[in-house]
Protein backbone atom coordinates (compact mmCIF):
# COMPACT_ATOMS: atom_id res chain seq x y z
CA UNK A 1 0.00 0.00 0.00
CA UNK A 2 1.56 3.27 -1.11
CA UNK A 3 1.67 6.45 0.98
CA UNK A 4 -1.23 8.84 0.39
CA UNK A 5 0.83 11.28 -1.67
CA UNK A 6 1.54 8.59 -4.26
CA UNK A 7 -2.00 7.25 -4.64
CA UNK A 8 -3.00 9.61 -7.49
CA UNK A 9 0.09 8.80 -9.63
CA UNK A 10 -0.50 5.10 -8.92
CA UNK A 11 -4.12 5.37 -10.07
CA UNK A 12 -3.06 7.20 -13.24
CA UNK A 13 -0.45 4.48 -13.90
CA UNK A 14 -3.14 1.81 -13.52
CA UNK A 15 -5.45 3.58 -15.99
CA UNK A 16 -2.66 4.04 -18.54
CA UNK A 17 -1.22 0.53 -18.24
CA UNK A 18 -4.71 -0.98 -18.27
CA UNK A 19 -5.59 0.88 -21.48
CA UNK A 20 -2.34 -0.25 -23.15
CA UNK A 21 -2.95 -3.86 -22.16
CA UNK A 22 -6.64 -3.86 -23.05
CA UNK A 23 -6.37 -2.27 -26.49
CA UNK A 24 -2.82 -3.10 -27.63
CA UNK A 25 -1.80 -6.02 -25.45
CA UNK A 26 -0.79 -8.35 -28.25
CA UNK A 27 1.31 -5.85 -30.18
CA UNK A 28 2.99 -4.51 -27.02
CA UNK A 29 2.98 -7.78 -25.09
CA UNK A 30 6.53 -7.54 -23.77
CA UNK A 31 5.86 -4.00 -22.57
CA UNK A 32 2.62 -5.19 -20.95
CA UNK A 33 4.50 -8.01 -19.22
CA UNK A 34 7.07 -5.52 -17.95
CA UNK A 35 4.40 -3.10 -16.69
CA UNK A 36 2.33 -5.74 -14.92
CA UNK A 37 5.44 -7.43 -13.58
CA UNK A 38 6.52 -4.07 -12.15
CA UNK A 39 3.09 -3.41 -10.64
CA UNK A 40 2.86 -6.86 -9.05
CA UNK A 41 6.46 -6.81 -7.82
CA UNK A 42 6.05 -3.30 -6.38
CA UNK A 43 2.81 -4.29 -4.61
CA UNK A 44 4.33 -7.47 -3.18
CA UNK A 45 7.56 -5.84 -1.99
CA UNK A 46 5.97 -2.67 -0.57
CA UNK A 47 3.32 -4.67 1.32
CA UNK A 48 6.11 -6.26 3.36
CA UNK A 49 7.19 -2.88 4.74
CA UNK A 50 5.62 -1.00 7.62
CA UNK A 51 3.07 1.66 6.63
CA UNK A 52 5.02 4.33 8.53
CA UNK A 53 8.27 3.61 6.70
CA UNK A 54 7.64 5.73 3.59
CA UNK A 55 11.17 5.60 2.18
CA UNK A 56 11.42 1.88 2.85
CA UNK A 57 8.12 1.26 1.06
CA UNK A 58 9.21 3.31 -1.95
CA UNK A 59 12.60 1.59 -2.15
CA UNK A 60 11.00 -1.84 -1.79
CA UNK A 61 8.40 -0.93 -4.44
CA UNK A 62 11.08 0.12 -6.93
CA UNK A 63 13.32 -2.89 -6.33
CA UNK A 64 10.40 -5.32 -6.26
CA UNK A 65 8.90 -3.72 -9.36
CA UNK A 66 12.11 -4.02 -11.36
CA UNK A 67 12.52 -7.64 -10.27
CA UNK A 68 8.93 -8.43 -11.20
CA UNK A 69 9.29 -6.77 -14.61
CA UNK A 70 12.47 -8.73 -15.39
CA UNK A 71 10.95 -12.03 -14.27
CA UNK A 72 7.83 -11.65 -16.42
CA UNK A 73 9.70 -10.43 -19.49
CA UNK A 74 12.13 -13.34 -19.35
CA UNK A 75 9.35 -15.79 -18.51
CA UNK A 76 7.48 -14.93 -21.72
CA UNK A 77 6.73 -18.48 -22.90
CA UNK A 78 6.38 -19.86 -19.39
CA UNK A 79 3.76 -17.21 -18.67
CA UNK A 80 1.71 -18.16 -21.73
CA UNK A 81 1.86 -21.84 -20.78
CA UNK A 82 0.81 -21.04 -17.21
CA UNK A 83 -2.18 -19.04 -18.47
CA UNK A 84 -3.27 -22.02 -20.56
CA UNK A 85 -2.72 -24.44 -17.67
CA UNK A 86 -4.77 -22.22 -15.39
CA UNK A 87 -7.61 -22.08 -17.91
CA UNK A 88 -7.51 -25.87 -18.24
CA UNK A 89 -7.70 -26.32 -14.47
CA UNK A 90 -10.59 -23.82 -14.33
CA UNK A 91 -12.49 -25.77 -16.99
CA UNK A 92 -11.97 -28.96 -14.98
CA UNK A 93 -13.39 -27.42 -11.80
CA UNK A 94 -16.33 -25.69 -13.50
CA UNK A 95 -17.34 -28.73 -15.56
CA UNK A 96 -16.97 -31.13 -12.63
CA UNK A 97 -19.13 -28.89 -10.45
CA UNK A 98 -22.02 -29.52 -12.85
CA UNK A 99 -22.16 -33.10 -11.54
CA UNK A 100 -22.61 -31.90 -7.97
CA UNK A 101 -19.17 -32.98 -6.80
CA UNK A 102 -16.91 -30.61 -4.92
CA UNK A 103 -13.47 -31.30 -6.37
CA UNK A 104 -12.58 -33.01 -9.65
CA UNK A 105 -10.10 -35.90 -9.65
CA UNK A 106 -6.48 -34.76 -9.64
CA UNK A 107 -5.81 -36.73 -12.83
CA UNK A 108 -8.50 -34.76 -14.68
CA UNK A 109 -7.15 -31.42 -13.44
CA UNK A 110 -3.60 -32.32 -14.45
CA UNK A 111 -4.73 -33.62 -17.84
CA UNK A 112 -6.75 -30.49 -18.66
CA UNK A 113 -3.99 -28.24 -17.34
CA UNK A 114 -1.46 -29.93 -19.65
CA UNK A 115 -3.87 -29.72 -22.59
CA UNK A 116 -4.50 -26.06 -21.76
CA UNK A 117 -0.76 -25.31 -21.65
CA UNK A 118 -0.18 -27.04 -24.99
CA UNK A 119 -3.18 -25.30 -26.53
CA UNK A 120 -2.01 -21.94 -25.24
CA UNK A 121 1.40 -22.42 -26.85
CA UNK A 122 -0.26 -23.36 -30.14
CA UNK A 123 -2.73 -20.47 -29.99
CA UNK A 124 -0.46 -17.86 -28.45
CA UNK A 125 -1.97 -14.92 -30.30
CA UNK A 126 -5.51 -15.55 -29.07
CA UNK A 127 -4.45 -16.41 -25.52
CA UNK A 128 -2.47 -13.17 -25.32
CA UNK A 129 -5.32 -11.10 -26.77
CA UNK A 130 -7.95 -12.54 -24.41
CA UNK A 131 -5.67 -12.41 -21.38
CA UNK A 132 -4.47 -8.84 -21.95
CA UNK A 133 -7.96 -7.58 -22.82
CA UNK A 134 -9.49 -8.92 -19.60
CA UNK A 135 -6.52 -8.07 -17.40
CA UNK A 136 -6.12 -4.62 -18.92
CA UNK A 137 -9.83 -3.84 -18.65
CA UNK A 138 -9.87 -4.71 -14.96
CA UNK A 139 -6.72 -2.70 -14.27
CA UNK A 140 -8.17 0.29 -16.12
CA UNK A 141 -11.42 0.08 -14.15
CA UNK A 142 -9.62 -0.16 -10.79
CA UNK A 143 -7.53 2.90 -11.64
CA UNK A 144 -10.56 4.84 -12.88
CA UNK A 145 -12.54 3.99 -9.73
CA UNK A 146 -9.62 5.14 -7.59
CA UNK A 147 -9.49 8.46 -9.47
CA UNK A 148 -13.24 8.96 -9.24
CA UNK A 149 -13.61 7.99 -5.58
CA UNK A 150 -10.36 9.52 -4.26
CA UNK A 151 -9.53 6.18 -2.62
CA UNK A 152 -6.40 4.05 -2.93
CA UNK A 153 -6.46 1.88 -6.08
CA UNK A 154 -6.33 -1.31 -4.06
CA UNK A 155 -9.49 -0.31 -2.17
CA UNK A 156 -11.49 1.36 -4.92
CA UNK A 157 -13.01 -1.82 -6.34
CA UNK A 158 -12.96 -4.18 -3.38
CA UNK A 159 -15.73 -5.48 -1.17
CA UNK A 160 -15.58 -3.77 2.19
CA UNK A 161 -12.52 -1.75 1.19
CA UNK A 162 -10.09 -4.58 1.92
CA UNK A 163 -6.62 -3.79 0.67
CA UNK A 164 -5.18 -5.88 -2.18
CA UNK A 165 -8.25 -8.11 -2.52
CA UNK A 166 -9.45 -7.48 -6.05
CA UNK A 167 -12.37 -9.70 -6.97
CA UNK A 168 -13.94 -8.78 -10.32
CA UNK A 169 -16.98 -11.00 -9.75
CA UNK A 170 -17.69 -9.90 -6.16
CA UNK A 171 -17.76 -6.09 -6.36
CA UNK A 172 -18.20 -3.73 -3.46
CA UNK A 173 -21.74 -2.68 -2.47
CA UNK A 174 -23.10 -0.14 -4.92
CA UNK A 175 -20.81 -1.40 -7.69
CA UNK A 176 -22.90 -4.27 -9.03
CA UNK A 177 -22.42 -2.78 -12.50
CA UNK A 178 -18.68 -3.43 -12.30
CA UNK A 179 -18.58 -7.03 -13.68
CA UNK A 180 -20.80 -5.98 -16.58
CA UNK A 181 -18.58 -2.99 -17.35
CA UNK A 182 -15.52 -5.23 -17.05
CA UNK A 183 -16.95 -7.79 -19.50
CA UNK A 184 -18.07 -5.10 -21.96
CA UNK A 185 -14.72 -3.30 -21.87
CA UNK A 186 -12.88 -6.61 -22.27
CA UNK A 187 -14.94 -7.49 -25.34
CA UNK A 188 -14.24 -4.06 -26.84
CA UNK A 189 -10.54 -4.55 -26.10
CA UNK A 190 -10.55 -7.97 -27.79
CA UNK A 191 -12.36 -6.55 -30.81
CA UNK A 192 -9.87 -3.69 -31.13
CA UNK A 193 -6.92 -6.06 -30.85
CA UNK A 194 -8.33 -8.61 -33.29
CA UNK A 195 -9.38 -5.95 -35.79
CA UNK A 196 -6.68 -3.31 -35.49
CA UNK A 197 -3.74 -3.46 -33.08
CA UNK A 198 -3.31 -7.23 -32.94
CA UNK A 199 -3.43 -7.93 -36.65
CA UNK A 200 -0.65 -10.07 -38.02
CA UNK A 201 1.58 -8.23 -40.50
CA UNK A 202 1.05 -9.29 -44.11
Image: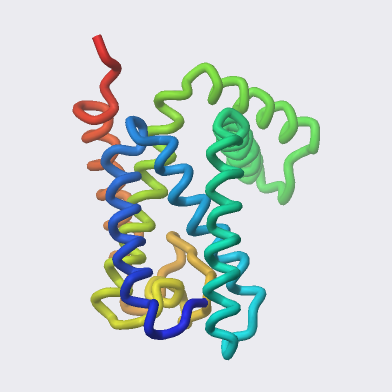
Front-most of residues 2 and 115: 2
Front-most of residues 179 and 79: 79
Counting from the top left corner in percent of width and height, residue 109 is at: 72, 35
37 sits to left or right of 180: right
14 sits to left or right of 181: right
Give the answer, above or below, for where 7 lies relative to 120.
below
Counting from the top left corner in percent of width and height, residue 129 is at: 37, 33
Give the answer, above or below, for where 190 lies relative to 119.
below
Residue drawn at 61 percent across, 21 percent down: 118
- Image quadrant in which you'd find residue 132: top left
Residue drawn at 62 percent across, 27 percent down: 117
Outermost residue, right side? 106
In the rendered image, is residue 91 in sight? no
Residue drawn at 36 percent across, 49 percent down: 136
Counting from the top left corner in percent of width and height, residue 135 is at: 41, 49
49 sits to left or right of 1: right
Counting from the top left corner in percent of width and height, residue 95 is at: 60, 38
- Image quadrant in which you'd find residue 199: top left
Q: How many labels does the image show?
A: 0
Front-most of residues 98 and 128: 128
**Which quadrant does the C terminus fall into?**
top left
Residue drawn at 29 percent across, 38 percent down: 24
Outermost residue, top side? 202
Outermost residue, bottom side? 52
Amino acid sequence: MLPHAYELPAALLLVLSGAIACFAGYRLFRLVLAIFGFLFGAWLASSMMGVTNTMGMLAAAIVGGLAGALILVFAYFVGIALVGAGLGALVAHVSWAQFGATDPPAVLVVLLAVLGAVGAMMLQRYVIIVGTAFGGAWTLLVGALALASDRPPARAATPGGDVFVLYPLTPAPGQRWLPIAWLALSIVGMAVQLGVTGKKPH
